[in-house]
Amino acid sequence: MLRQSVGSERDAPRPGPEASEATRYLCAAAHTDESFAERALAEALDDDLRAVAPSVGFDLTSVLRHCLHARQRRRRRDLRLVVAGGLAVLLAPLWTLLAGTVMVVGTKLAPFRPSRHGLVGPVAALFSVALVALVLLVQLPGVGGSEGGSGLPGWIVGRPVLALPFGVVAYLVLVAHLLGTRRLLVTQLRRGRFRPPVADAARDGRYADRLAAVDEAQRGNVTVYGGYVPFVGHGTPVAGWSFALPIVPAGHGSLLPGVPPDPADPPVSFAVDDLIDHVRSRLGAVRLDASDTDRLPDLRLEDRIFVGGRLLTDDPRLLPDRERMPRQRWTDEEVREVATHPRGVARHYLCALVPSWGGEVVASTFLHFSTDGRVLYLECARTLLEPPRWDHHDVDRLTEWLPANQFAQLLVTAGETLLRTALGAPLRLLQDLIRAVRLHPRRERARRLAREDLGHDYGARVGVRELAAGTGYHNYFQVLDAAKHLKVVERHVLAAIVDFLDDRGVETAEFRNRQTMILNQGVIQTGGLSVVGNQAVGSGARAEQRSEAVPTPRAGQAPTG
């Protein structure tokens, strides 16, 4: 039965996502991509009534804790920049702004652009910036006791000599922050050194309760989604298929549209959960059978319930308390009830997830079966979760020691971003303060709205993993593996359905025709590339006459390191 199958699969040992490559890269992105970190925190932590998207191939709480740590580091940096930069502006407003502008312009000049492989460019850029800043220091009125003839008010010119040390301190604050980020990446997030952060109520602060709830919800078997597409957190939907198959005894042929079944025909009946168990068993063999050439050792099978976030009011199993987040872990009996009788707002899917490349790429297949009288309805939906953006992989390029050219490049980067970072620091600190003050009132307001609006949307809008996904793949083999995994799962699913129907004495001629059509003329869409039968369409597309169409990577993608 379905309940027993669910339990056996859950107990099967498999490596957890906490130490996956995808988790590590997303933790690194928290420290190098401020916009990703802030959006991840906003989506997962700020609204404690919102459901959590399933974590596919990664551990969400590890990523969120690194996002919180990165936010705290940036706050300390901004506070120091406000103090040092503020004093420099108070002492010499004009010189401070001119010197900052010179640093930005000087480091952006084409001949002095920083390079990974050269030391001359960064050093020349730093030297030219320092020289121009000193010229400004000497030439501006008010330096050395000379009261000017520029006609500018004295408070605008100020005392550049006194402001210079504070400007240097602000620059060194940014350099220290960049060095600290690099050290953190090298010591904690390089391959072989990554350890998931453990729960710490003192460090997690006011988010401790929400983090605990997120950790439990991300491992649940219920997806409460916002919007239209239910497969939130699983990536981009790709081509699938669905059709209705008449259930008639073998040898009687398929029913034509509009032709009622013959009452004299012996009835053929079976339980939907028996079909689900049969397909599960067949896919489980693909994962466990070492002799199978199509073996997928990383295949994960799970029963999952999908329900829209605005449709929870009438089901206490989903929303026992309107002032709390939805319940995202159901018992096996509750899952089985929905699978057997898919009549309400909740729908059951048997999910086959195949992570590859350390969880960076995940090919997911979602299977839904139901019967209505003498018709069997079959649906196969598929998604592809693309790898994190290429720049999030820079952590693997960092050496234990800091080469001179990279140190010079870091100094230039600090000079190039100093003015923008320092000017934005007061606003960011103010936004952080407002966010902290408004967090509790906003949550109380959300609870009030949930009480008053029976259609309140509790659904997850986007998965954190999807926020970090790039627009394509990094190399050819990632595309090839994703397409292969979808096709292998599809082939075994179709074969399992045929075997099941044959065993139950159901006519399968029509299904076999559809099976041939799906396998030979199926559509695989991966990003900008579509493979239809033996024809490839898209950027850099190519197809060969083979038993399976093989997609090629997008043009212009970064090569493998």
Image (tube, rainbow, N blue to C red):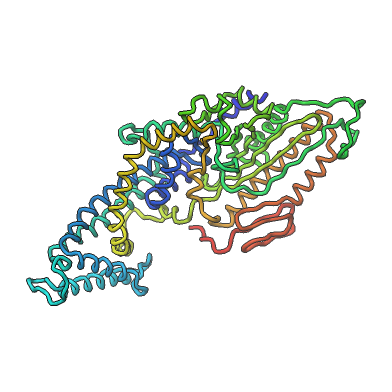
Horizontally, residue 82 falls left or right of residue 145, namely right
The residue located at (65%, 29%) in the rendering is 344
Q: Nearer the viewer, residue 432 or 108?
A: 432
- Extreme residue in the bottom direction: 149
Horizontally, residue 215 falls left or right of residue 307, namely left
- Extreme residue in the right direction: 264
Number of dots carrying numbers: 0
Q: Position of residue 298 (x, y in %)?
A: 58, 39
Q: Position of residue 193 (x, y in %)?
A: 39, 44
Residue 405 vertical placement versus 304 (above, below): below
Q: Position of residue 416 (x, y in %)?
A: 31, 64
The residue located at (48%, 29%) in the rendering is 451
Which of the 4 image quadrants contains residue 378? Answer: top right
Q: Nearer the viewer, residue 61 or 244?
A: 244
Q: Nearer the viewer, residue 266 or 45?
A: 45
Q: Position of residue 481 (x, y in %)?
A: 61, 50
The quadrant of the picture occupied by the N terminus is: top right
The residue located at (84%, 29%) in the rendering is 505
Horizontally, residue 148 falls left or right of residue 338, namely left
- Extreme residue in the left direction: 145
Which of the 4 image quadrants contains residue 291? Answer: top right
Residue 433 vertical placement versus 313 (above, below): below
Q: Nearer the viewer, residue 306 or 128?
A: 306
